[in-house]
Image: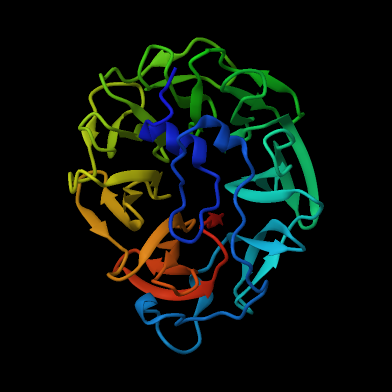
């Protein structure tokens, strides 16, 4: 069984928590904390006007913003009548348009399923009554799917296949597949726990972390069920698998060099190579995500409350830090074409913003007010 103080465990348990402006992932020392509802964020005005230059450190150009780069939907979270809702950025007005309805809090996951925004719905203010469930949101309509449990985390989906999700629906932590028909299939059954599923781009395989053989290692198995293949075998922990867009490579995190760093390996298994630089031993890397082009991997490097968004060339290993000095970028999402990043940016005591970075030159081209440390960008 994994130790609760391991970095990989803390990230797996905390991925969907809304942090208080400074960090997007809250390390949790006791597993019960992960089943509590996300903490509230400071209230903000829903539909606040766009602010291309909220703070000097944001370094966005003055004057009107050219939003022609904004393809797809950028989502954040806003508070409406005391409930947290996904909200879509409307470029014509620079305002956040809330989605969903009802008494549950809704948190967008970064996936679109059959035209709907895939969210996690949560309700209940205590450990005794707190429950979570997947929800498909179209406009104000919310349709709940899959198992309801104190913890429903890390949903992943690809192609036209099922949603695979981590949950304590029937055990400490296992993976379940939710078919388009609503049928739920249990994929794993291990007392040590199975975490952070990632479905391959072709929808046929799911990679995940598991402590079934002692320390956390990476495994893969068919989405339809069946035996798992072990992909890594180290004396330390491996976690957070992320498939390259062509399905050939897995990026992942590991503390095999003591601090959490970014690595890549063939998706079928084989030797791994490190992608992120060594740096300060007190730093850790989180949130590996491939650019849609497949040439670059993004990650966040944290040191205490300080954090930067970085990109690394998967072929050459060249790393660039896109966060300017004087600010913290605590969360990010790739644009559908990979040319831009949306980041949640905090600067001192200033209110957070969602800033947009042009990856080619690192320039911040726009920024809008934000409530909390969550941003998603859907095609």
Q: Residue at x 55, y 61 (%)?
A: 372
Q: Is residue 314 found left or right of 30 in the rendered image? A: left
Residue 159 appears in the rendering: no
Of 170 and 43, nearer the camera is 43
Q: Say which quarter of the image contains residue 262.
A: top left
Please state which of residues 306 and 294 is positioned toward the viewer in this rendering.
Answer: 306
In the image shown, does 27 or 270 lie closer to the viewer?
27
Left or right for 247, reference 97: left
> The C terminus appears in which quarter of the rendering?
bottom right
Point out residue 253 in the picture as x, y percentages from the top left corner: 33, 35
Residue at coordinates 56% horizontally, 16% vertically from top-left? 188
Q: Is residue 149 left or right of residue 264?
A: right
Task: Give residue 10's position: percent from left, percent from top.
Answer: 44, 36
Give x and y (percent) for residue 155: 58, 36
- Residue appearing at x 47%, y 89% in the figure: 63
Question: Quarter of the image containing the N terminus?
Answer: top left
Residue at position x 54%, y 11% in the image: 226
Looking at the image, is 125 positioned above or below residue 371?
Answer: above
Which residue is outermost to the bottom? Answer: 63
The number of callouts visible is 0
């Amino acid at each position: 069984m994994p130790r609760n103080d391991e970095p990989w465990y803390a990230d797996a348990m905390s991925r969907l928590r809304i942090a208080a402006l400074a960090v997007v992932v809250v390390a949790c020392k006791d597993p019960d904390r992960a089943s509590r509802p996300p903490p509230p964020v400071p209230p903000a005005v829903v539909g606040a006007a766009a602010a291309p230059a909220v703070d000097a450190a944001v370094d966005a150009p003055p004057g009107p913003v050219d939003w022609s780069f904004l393809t797809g939907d950028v989502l954040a979270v806003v508070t409406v009548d005391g409930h947290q809702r996904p909200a879509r950025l409307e470029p014509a007005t620079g305002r956040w348009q809330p989605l969903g309805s009802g008494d549950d809090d809704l948190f967008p996951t970064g996936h679109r399923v059959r035209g709907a925004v895939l969210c996690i719905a949560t309700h209940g203010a205590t450990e005794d009554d707190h429950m979570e469930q997947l929800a498909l949101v179209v406009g104000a309509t919310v349709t709940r799917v899959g198992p309801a449990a104190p913890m429903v985390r890390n949903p992943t989906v690809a192609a036209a296949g099922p949603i695979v999700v981590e949950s304590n629906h029937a055990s400490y932590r296992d993976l379940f597949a939710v078919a388009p028909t609503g049928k739920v299939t249990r994929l794993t059954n291990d007392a040590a726990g199975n975490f952070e599923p990632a479905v391959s781009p072709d929808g046929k395989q799911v990679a995940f972390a598991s402590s079934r053989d002692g320390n956390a290692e990476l495994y893969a198995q068919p989405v339809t069920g069946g035996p798992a293949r072990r992909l890594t075998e180290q004396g330390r922990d491996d976690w957070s698998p992320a498939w390259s867009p062509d399905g050939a490579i897995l990026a992942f995190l590991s503390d095999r060099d003591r601090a959490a760093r970014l690595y890549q390996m063939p998706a079928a298994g084989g030797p791994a190579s490190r992608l992120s630089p060594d740096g300060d031993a007190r730093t850790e890397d989180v949130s590996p995500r491939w650019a849609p082009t497949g040439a670059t991997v993004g990650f966040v490097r944290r040191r205490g409350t300080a954090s930067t968004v970085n990109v690394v060339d998967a072929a050459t290993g060249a790393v660039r830090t896109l966060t300017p000095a004087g600010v913290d970028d605590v969360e990010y999402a790739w644009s559908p074409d990979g040319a831009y990043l949306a980041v949640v940016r905090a600067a001192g005591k200033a209110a957070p913003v969602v800033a947009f970075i042009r990856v080619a030159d690192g320039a911040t081209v726009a920024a809008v007010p934000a409530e909390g440390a969550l941003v998603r960008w859907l095609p």
